[in-house]
């Protein structure tokens, strides 16, 4: 049996060579997977290379050389095989959009590192150094993975992305077990990669990611939501980046002004769709956008003032709780999450919120509820975590 360091890299360029590798992964019930893809000019990431490691094999699979990736997509959807990956959102989106499969049993080592006290956005290089004392020499990150032939340095770079990944996952799991955090990670993995996980952007919620949406008043939010959903669906249909169809700033202006005719739309800065089916559909969407998003109805002035005043205190409690526990705060709640939490507690103490369920409630949610009820105060400490409840 080869050690991880000296495993030879197999270059797989045919379907016949791919089959036995996937058989080994299924027999072991576990493998490490990574991909190289390009995403600049398309809606769906274009897979240029797939790297797979088992306990004793290390392979680089080349679809550009003609290897069909449908068998790999089948492995991604196989519940009998755990897929160990690092920050896999782009990789998973590629399999969903290109091969119409739903990945299951994904173990994200970046997510695990956040629960293990290494930080929530750790790069693979930093993770391997922290967990295994392994240093990678990565100099090919901005390479053109669609060009052939690949150099020896490119192949080694790609293979190293999975060479140590199973060992890193084992080290993280052992650390989490000693910390009593295995259940926390399992819950979060289920939420992010389970049956209800959104692997690709939901068109109906795409408006929440539109930069500058805060400029749109309540009466325009319905138009923004409808226009963003249309853009997302049209971009997916044409396999183009959404911003290539309509930029965010233009989308915001469309929602604010809601042009009724093509002539009215001519005055919208940045709108490059001037005529034809696309413009007709977009104008129809703006004309009949449906009701505004209920969750974003304008808050009463007193609630907005309360959010502004209380948010720094809630953030301090969150940071202190996460620092004391060694958990990355960004895994627990964002600023927007805290704002909706404060608003919900102000309007209706029983309103559901992620901070009131599962491990988030155990770690920070209960303390935040007590803060908002005035049941705790904060004091400054001379050292970490710098703030404590009293």
Image: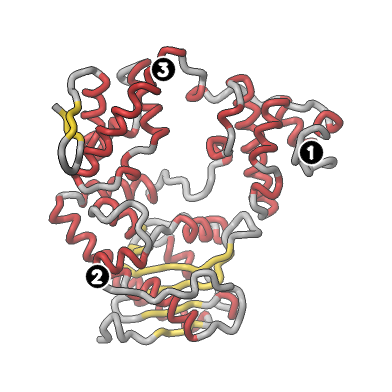
140 relative position to 210: left or right: left
> For residue 305, which numbered disc appears in the image?
3
Rendered-image quadrant of the N terminus: bottom left
Q: Is residue 279 above or below residue 146?
A: above
Which mark, residue 45?
Answer: none
In this rendering, the label closer to the viewer, 3 or 1: 3
Where's the C terminus, which quadrant?
top left
| Spatial separation of the CA atoms under disc 3 and disc 1 | 40 Å
Closer to the N terminus: mark 3 or mark 2? Answer: 2
Please state the horizontal and vertical placement of residue 83, each as a whole percent of the image: 36, 63
Residue 132, labelled with which disc?
Answer: 2
**Residue 349 lies in what quarter of the image?**
top left
Image point (41%, 16%), residue name? 303
Q: Would residue 3 appear left or right of 243 to someone viewing this image?
A: left
The mark nearer the N terminus, 3 or 1, is 1
Give above or below for 357 relative to 8.
above
Nearer the camera: disc 3 or disc 2: 3
Residue 50 visible at all = yes
Which quarter of the figure has residue 30? bottom left
Q: Earlier in the sequence, mark 1 or mark 2?
A: 2
384 in relation to 293, above or below:
below
Circle 3 Cα neighbour tier, 10 Å, few/some/many (<14 / 14–19 / ≥20): few
Write the residue at 66% across / 26% down.
289
From this view, report whether residue 379 is shown above or below residue 271. Answer: above
Tell me whether the residue at label 1 lies in contact with that at label 2, contact meaning CB atoms closer than 8 angstroms.
no
Q: Which residue in the structure is indicated by mark 1?
A: 279
Q: Secondary structure at mark 2?
A: helix
**What residue occupies the far front of the structure in this picture?**
382
Where residue 320 sits: x, y (%)?
23, 38
Task: Between label 1 and label 2, give the one nearer the viewer.
Answer: 2
The residue carrying pointer 2 sits among few (fewer than 14), some (14 to 19) or many (20 or more) residues within 10 Å by Cα, namely some
Q: CA distance from mark 3 to mark 2?
A: 48 Å
């Amino acid at each position: 049996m080869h050690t991880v360091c000296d495993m030879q890299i197999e270059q797989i360029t045919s379907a016949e060579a791919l089959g036995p590798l996937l058989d080994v992964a299924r027999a072991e019930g576990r493998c490490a997977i990574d991909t190289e893809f390009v995403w600049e000019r398309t809606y769906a990431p274009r897979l240029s290379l797939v790297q797979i490691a088992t306990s004793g094999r290390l392979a680089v699979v080349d679809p550009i050389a003609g290897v069909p990736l449908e068998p790999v997509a089948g492995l991604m959807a196989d519940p009998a095989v755990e897929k160990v990956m690092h920050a896999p959102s782009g990789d998973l989106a590629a399999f969903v959009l290109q091969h119409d499969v739903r990945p299951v049993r994904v173990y994200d080592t970046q997510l695990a590192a956040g629960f293990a006290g290494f930080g929530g956005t750790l790069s693979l290089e930093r993770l391997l150094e922290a967990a295994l004392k392994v240093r990678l020499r990565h100099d090919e990150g901005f390479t053109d993975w669609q060009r052939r032939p690949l150099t020896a340095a490119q192949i080694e770079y790609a293979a190293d992305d999975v060479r140590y990944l199973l060992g890193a996952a084992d080290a993280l799991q052992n650390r989490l077990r000693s910390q009593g955090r295995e259940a926390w990670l399992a819950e979060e993995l289920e939420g992010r990669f389970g049956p209800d996980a959104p692997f690709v952007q939901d068109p109906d919620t795409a408006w929440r990611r539109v930069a500058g949406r805060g400029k749109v008043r309540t009466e325009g939010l319905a138009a923004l939501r409808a226009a963003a959903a249309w853009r997302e669906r049209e971009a997916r249909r044409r396999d183009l980046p959404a911003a290539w169809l309509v930029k965010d700033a233009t989308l915001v202006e469309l929602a604010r002004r809601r042009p009724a005719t093509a002539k009215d739309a001519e005055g919208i800065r940045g709108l490059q769709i001037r005529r034809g089916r696309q413009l007709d559909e977009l104008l129809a969407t703006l004309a009949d956008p449906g009701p505004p998003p209920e969750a974003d109805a304008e808050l009463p002035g007193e609630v907005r003032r309360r959010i502004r005043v209380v948010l720094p205190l809630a953030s301090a409690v969150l940071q202190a709780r996460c620092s004391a526990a060694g958990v990355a705060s960004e895994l627990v709640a964002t600023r927007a999450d805290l704002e909706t939490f404060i608003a919900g507690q102000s309007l209706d103490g029983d309103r559901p919120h992620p901070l009131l369920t599962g491990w988030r409630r155990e770690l920070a949610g209960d303390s935040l509820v007590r803060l908002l009820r005035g049941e705790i105060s904060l004091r400054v400490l001379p050292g970490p975590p710098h703030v404590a409840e009293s």
